[in-house]
Image: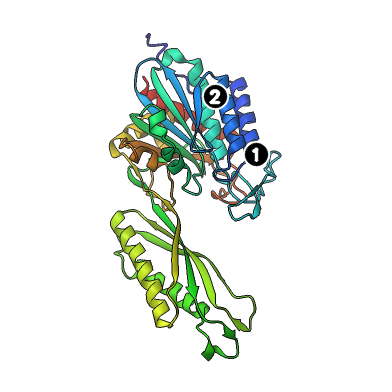
């Protein structure tokens, strides 16, 4: 292989960029809810078929593509595919008007409010560029178009469906996510990069009575108020300041009328932690406090139900240092920075942890430098500058893959 042929081109010409932009606009306008990404999966498979890349469905609505080019390393690359139950308010000509149905039957608007359309487009575009430059790399890429990231269901579903029995076992897995900072820049974190997350529904049981006769009641609203306030002490009074954690009550529902004390109250909790020791302490503390407050109110035993759980995302330190250097060489030393661990959560880490292989996950900027503060992920206004963000995402993907597939 000559020196010239070994140089992988990471930038796009005008025609290639136009194809990429149209792909993005299509995906943005047609989002689907977690684990319901049937049309998205069909679209991805169609694009992989056009490129001659072997592919199959995995985990219900996930797609795995296997791009082979001789002997060499096996590298996984993940792009998540699901949208969110958000009504888009961006004003874009390609804005989503899609609707979907949640698991409880509720019909909701659907939007790519976290940039997963950007991830899919960048991955498909990178696959196309690699298909055109087979003299510049050797090995195998396992493209992981993963569903259900927003609910932590997708990676589990693909693994349960025998992902690593059906696809070649990778030496390393790479992944990326668009974020509201300047396009052309990259942020990555060695070691613990994103938090574990656990979500709970708590059902408090009381005794109903007339609002004028509280002595005949066991008031679950008062019980809930005391419980939620006490739960905040798990972080503020039971954990050392050097052990970060978050306990958030995101919803509280009770009662139908102001003069009726209801017989139950429900609230939801979201917990974020970085280590198993802290996680165990907080989860045990939730059980202890919820039950103790119910006892203090002479109420029946509450129900505590966990309804989703995100694994840790722990970037391999050695490989993260390598990827940092590779991306800095591609985009510029000043464009790639180490960032603190994020309290947000991802199920990406499960794909590598399941088979004990290292992984590296980074964030790339999606907005015009110097513009007004960018809308955050999960906002109805979240809309990356697709030309700049996709150019960054494709270059980062190709640079990372190219390093391992030299």
* Position of residue 45 measured from the top left corner of the image (x, y, whole percent): 56, 27
* Position of residue 66 measured from the top left corner of the image (x, y, whole percent): 45, 24
Residue drawn at 60 percent across, 86 percent down: 211
Q: Which residue is mark 2?
A: 48
The CA span between labels 1 and 2 is 18 Å
Dot 2: element: helix
Residue 173: in sight, yes or no? yes
Dot 1: element: loop
Residue 329: in sight, yes or no? no
Q: Which residue is mark 1?
A: 30
Instruction: Of the two numbered discs 1 and 2 on the same chain, state the one appearing first in sequence.
Output: 1
Which quarter of the figure is the N terminus placed in?
top left
Color encoding of the figure:
rainbow
Q: Decide which of 327, 210 is in the foreground and name it.
A: 210
Categorize mark 1 by other alpha carbons within 10 Å: few (<14), some (14-19), many (20+): many
Q: How many marks?
A: 2
* Position of residue 314 measured from the top left corner of the image (x, y, whole percent): 34, 44
**In the current view of this chain or complex, which residue is farthest to the top?**
2
Q: Decide which of 170, 174 is in the foreground and name it.
A: 170
* Position of residue 99 measured from the top left corner of the image (x, y, whole percent): 67, 47
Which quarter of the figure is the C terminus placed in?
top left
């Amino acid at each position: 292989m000559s020196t010239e042929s070994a140089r992988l081109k990471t930038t796009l010409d005008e025609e290639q960029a136009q194809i990429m932009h149209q792909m993005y606009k299509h995906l943005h306008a047609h989002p689907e809810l977690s684990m319901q990404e049937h049309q998205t999966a069909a679209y991805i498979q169609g694009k992989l078929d056009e490129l001659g890349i072997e592919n199959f469905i995995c985990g219900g609505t996930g797609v795995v593509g296997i791009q082979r080019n001789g002997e060499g390393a096996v590298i996984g690359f993940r792009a998540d595919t699901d949208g969110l139950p958000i009504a888009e308010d961006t004003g874009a000509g390609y804005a989503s008007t899609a609707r979907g149905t949640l698991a409880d039957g509720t019909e909701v608007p659907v939007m790519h409010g976290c940039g997963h359309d950007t991830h899919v487009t960048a991955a498909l575009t990178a696959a196309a560029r690699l298909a055109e430059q087979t003299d510049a790399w050797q090995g195998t890429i396992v493209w992981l178009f993963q569903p259900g990231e927003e609910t932590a269901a997708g990676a589990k579903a693909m693994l349960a469906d025998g992902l690593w029995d059906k696809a070649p076992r990778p030496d390393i897995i790479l992944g990326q996510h668009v974020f509201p900072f300047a396009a052309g820049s990259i942020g990555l974190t060695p070691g613990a990069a994103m938090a574990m997350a656990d979500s709970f529904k708590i059902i408090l049981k009381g005794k109903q009575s007339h609002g004028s006769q509280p002595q005949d009641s066991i008031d679950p609203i008062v019980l809930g108020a005391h419980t939620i306030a006490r739960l905040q002490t798990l972080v503020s009074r039971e954990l050392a300041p050097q052990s970060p954690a978050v306990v958030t009550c995101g919803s509280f529902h009770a009662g139908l009328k102001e003069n009726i004390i209801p017989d139950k109250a429900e609230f939801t909790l979201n917990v974020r932690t970085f280590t198993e020791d802290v996680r165990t302490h907080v989860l045990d503390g939730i059980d202890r406090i919820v039950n103790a407050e119910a006892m203090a109110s002479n109420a029946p035993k509450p129900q505590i139900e966990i309804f989703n759980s995100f694994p840790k995302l722990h970037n391999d330190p050695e490989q993260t240092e390598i990827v940092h250097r590779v991306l800095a060489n591609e985009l510029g030393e000043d464009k790639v920075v180490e960032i603190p661990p994020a309290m947000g959560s991802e199920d990406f880490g499960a794909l590598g942890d399941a088979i004990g292989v290292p992984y590296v996950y980074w964030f790339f900027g999606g907005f015009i430098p110097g513009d007004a503060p960018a809308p955050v992920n999960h906002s109805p206004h979240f809309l990356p500058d697709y030309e700049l963000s996709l150019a960054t995402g494709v270059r980062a993907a190709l640079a990372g893959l190219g390093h391992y597939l030299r």
